[in-house]
Amino acid sequence: MATRDSLLFQPIRINQLEIAGRLIKTATAETRASEDGYVTPELLDFYIPMAKGGTPLIITGNIYVSPDGKSAPRQVGADHDDKIPGLTRLVATVHAYGSKFFAQLNHCGRQVVPRFAGLKEAVSASAKTELVTGTQPRRLSVPEIRSIIHHYADAAERCKRAGFDGVQIHSANGYLMSQFLTPYTNRREDEYGGTPDKRMNLLRQVLAAIRERVGPDFPVIIKMNGSDYLPLRPGLDTGQLADIALAMQHAGADAIEVSVGHYESGFPMVRGTFGRCLRNMVQGSMAHLPFVRRWGFRIFWPLLALLFNLIWTPQQGFNLRYTRVFKRKLSIPVICVGGFLTRDAMEAALDAGECDICSAGRAFIADPLLYRHLRDGVAGPRCVDCNACVGHLGAQPADCYHPVVRAQKYAMLEKLE
Ligand SMILES: Cc1cc2nc3c(=O)[nH]c(=O)nc-3n(C[C@H](O)[C@H](O)[C@H](O)COP(=O)(O)O)c2cc1C
C-alpha cells in the first residue's frame, strides 16, 4: 500500500486533538530525572530524536503524582508546582519538532521495593503482599484515598500548565488504579470495594477530578489491562475489563490503551527473551529485595530466563486479542501496545479494525526514528525483544542495551541533524 493510502499515516482525533498518524510512542519509564524528580538534560536527550523522527504522539514514562506513589529512582514527578518549569522546558523541546506530548500519571501502590524507591512504606487497596517483591503494603484509609484523587487532579493541572497536550491515567500493569480494580488485590468492603462497580470508584473519581480541572477539551486517556493474567488468582478477564473501559468512556475518557498483566504475572507485557533482562534486574532493582528473594533470583535467574523464554515468546501485536473485544464495545479510539515492530504488522491490525492506533515502546527505544523510517521505507535499528532495557529499569537510563542494536542506534544518532 502506498504511504498516502496507508491508515498508519492517516490522522486521527483524540478528543479535539488531531494526531498526525496512528503509530505512537507508548510510556516507558525513563530513569533520567534528577533523584528528586526534576527534568534533566538527559531526559530531553531521550525525547529529542523521537520528536525529530516525526512521532505523531509521545507519552512520557510514568510520572508520580505524589512522592508516596513513586515507583523507582530517577522517576519524573508532577507532585509540586516547582516541577512545572522543568516540565515546560521538556514539552517545549518536543513541541519544537511537531510531536504531540502526553504525560502518564501514576501512583505505584504496592508494586514497589520501598528501599529501592526511597520510600518508608507501600500502600494499596488492601494489605495484600506482592509476591515478586515481597512488599507488604498498608491498606489506605478513605481520607488517604481522597487525597490521592486530589494529587492526580493537581498533577494533571500542572501538566496542562506545562503545555502537555493531554494526560494518560496509568490503570494497567498492577499499579494502584489497577490494584483497586482487581478483586485479587482489592479486598475492601467500603465504597471502594466489594462489588465490581465499587472497585471502579477510585478510577472513576480520579478521571472526574482530572476532568474538572483540565476542562472538557483536554484529552484524558486511560491505559488498562486487556487481561490481568493472574492464573489461580481472582484477576479480571477481558470481558470484565472491556466493561470497565466502557464505563470509563461514559465517564469521559477519550481513548483506551490496552496492555496486559501485573508484576505477579511475570512478563506477558513484554514478550521476548529474558536472559539479559533478568541478569540486569538482579544487578539493579532486585539487589534491593528482601534477603530470600534477592538470593533466590541471584541463584535461579538463568533457569527462570529459560522458562520465561518458552512461555512468553515474541509476537507482534500480542494484545490485539484483547483490543478486538474492546473495539466491539467502545466508540472512542482503542490503542494497542505490545510487540509492534514492522509496518506490515501495524497496517494489518489497523486495516482489520482490531485497534485504531498502534503504540510501541521498545521499538522506539531501539530506533527513535521508527515512525519516519516506516513511512519512508528505510531500515533502522531493529529491537530484538531482548528486554535488557526492562532489566535496567530504575537503575540505568532508559536506552537500548543490546550491544549490536545499540551500536547501530548511536551510529544513526550521530548523523542526525
Ligand atoms: C524500559 C521500559 C519502561 C516501561 N515503563 C512503563 C511506564 O512507565 N508506563 C507504562 O505504562 N508502561 C511501561 N512500560 C511498558 C510499555 O509501555 C509497553 O506496554 C511494553 O513495553 C510493551 O510494548 P512494546 O512491545 O512496544 O515495548 C515500559 C516498558 C519498558 C521496556
Image: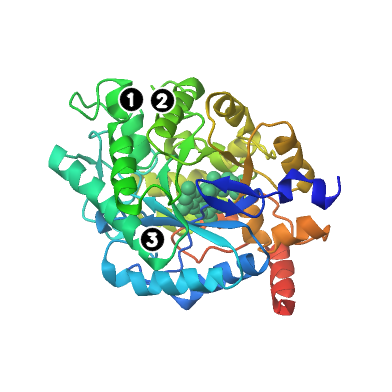
In the rendered image, residue 138, in percent from the top left (x then y), is placed at: 20, 41
Write the residue at 47% across / 22% down.
237
Question: Which circle, 1 or 3, is nearer the viewer?
Answer: 3
Mark 2: which amino acid? Answer: Gly
Relative side of 86 to 307, left or right:
left
Few, some or many C-alpha atoms within 10 Å of disc 1 (few <14, some 14-19, many ≥20)?
many
Query: SS at mark 1?
Result: loop
What's the CA distance linking mark 2 and mark 3?
34 Å
Helix, strand or loop at mark 3: helix
Q: Could you say where residue 272 lies in the image, as x and y percent from the top left? A: 65, 43
Colouring convention used in this rendered image of the protein: rainbow
Whichever of labels 1 and 3 marks the residue nearer the N terminus, that label is 3
Q: Are marks 1 and 2 in contact (CB under 8 Å)?
A: yes
Q: Is residue 77 visible?
A: no
For residue 146, which numbered disc appears in the image? none
Q: Position of residue 25 (x, y in %)?
A: 59, 54
Q: Which mark is residue 183?
A: 1
Mark 2 or mark 3: name the one nearer the start of the chain: 3
The residue lying toward the viewer, choosing from 247 and 367, is 247
Q: Which residue type does callout 3 highlight?
A: Lys
Q: Badge 3, how many Cα within 10 Å: few under 14, some, many 20+?
A: many
Q: Is mark 1 within 8 Å of ligand 1?
A: no
Report the residue marked by disc 2: 235
The residue to which callout 3 is attached is 160
- Is 326 drawn above or below residue 415 in the view shown? above
Measured in 3D between alpha carbons, the distance from the residue under mark 1 to the one under mark 3, in whole angstroms, is 33 Å
Instruction: Place residue 200 in its image quadrant.
Output: top left
At 41% from the left and 31% from the top, the residue drawn is 250
* Amino acid at circle 1: Pro
**x, y (%) of residue 191?**
20, 28
